[in-house]
Image: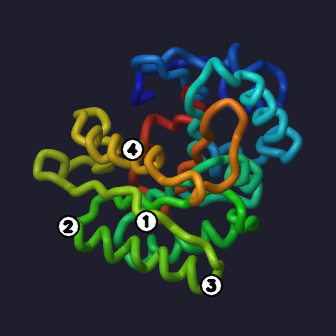
Amino acid sequence: ARLNLHTQYAVSQALSGWRGVREAWLAGPGSLRVLTGHFAEDESDAFSPAGQRRLIDELHALAGQIDYVVFDIGRSPQPSSKLLWQAATDVVLVSTADTVAVMDTYAAVKLCNVDPEGPRLWTFLNQAASEAAARDAHDRIALACRRFLALEVHRGGWMQPTDALASQESNLAAAASSGACEPPLLALAQAMADLPASQEGGSTPGGREVALARGRCLRTSTDLAADISVTS
């Protein structure tokens, strides 16, 4: 709704095989294609392993036609999210610097990242009071993942609240609509592109797949980009 996109089809139809991805997606801003849906919470029963594999296979078939695929797997990744997480080249952990959110972010990694050779992990800290606060939160997440899971987590960036956005429900979502989040998100994309190949995780034919996982302290926040499940 925040992108003013309305359709009778959603990701659940693509997962069930009732509609193909091309039939269900919508043209978004620029060259984006959006497959709407509420990933981890409202439609978790629809995300069977067979449905997820069908969706992933269909996206692989679009190799050469799309550059990036982004899965928004929600604020509370479920066991059903594991296949999508593991199919990704990169996972962006969107959290806040709040202690509970940091703990929830680590728990999401422990739940979903079962393969040491799986996707590269990144943090993106929303509503951080300062770069130092964002760095501290990243370091806590990265240290826990390194110590207990033997996983490296890369610093992806942070978003600082501004006076103009202070009254908004979600700093990140409000910034997205105002254009204020474009520099940090572009910096995240550049960091992903610049990381040496020797540090990359799993690969996906025909471009990159990125999973977004959001910390529990963002429950009152809106999604990064209007419940985006698939973008091209």
Q: Are marks 4 and 3 in contact (CB under 8 Å)?
A: no
Q: How far apart are the alpha carbons under marks 4 and 3?
A: 29 Å
Q: Mark 4 points at which residue?
A: 190
Residues 178 and 151: in front is 151
- SS label for mark 4: helix
Q: Distance between the residues labelled 2 and 3?
A: 27 Å
* N-term mark: 4 or 1: 4
Q: What kind of element bears circle 3?
A: helix
Find disc 3 in the rendering and name its residue: 148
What is the x, y in percent for residue 139?
40, 77
Residue at (45%, 71%) from the top-left corner?
101
Kind of residue indicated by mark 2: Ser
Dot 4 and dot 1 residues touching (CB under 8 Å): no
The front one of 192 and 160 is 192
Which amino acid lies under the numbered mark 1 shown in the image of this protein? Cys
Reading the chain from its start, which is encountered first: label 2 or label 1?
Answer: 2
Task: Give the label on residue 217, or none.
Answer: 1
Q: Would you place residue 6 above or below residue 82 in this image?
A: above
* Whole-number angstrom distance, CA of label 4 to CA of label 1: 27 Å
- Mark 1 secondary-structure assignment: helix
Which quadrant holds the C terminus? top right
Q: Quadrant of the N terminus?
A: top left
Task: Report helix, strand or loop for mark 2.
Answer: loop
Relative depth, front residue between 30 and 224 = 30
Direction from residue 138 to residue 168 in the image, left or right:
left
Nearer the N terminus, badge 1 or badge 3? 3
Q: Identify the image quadrant of residue 62.
A: top right
Distance from the alpha carbon under mark 2 to that under mark 4? 21 Å
User: Which is closer to the viewer, label 1 or label 3?
Assistant: 3
Instruction: Determine which residue is flagged by label 2.
Output: 130
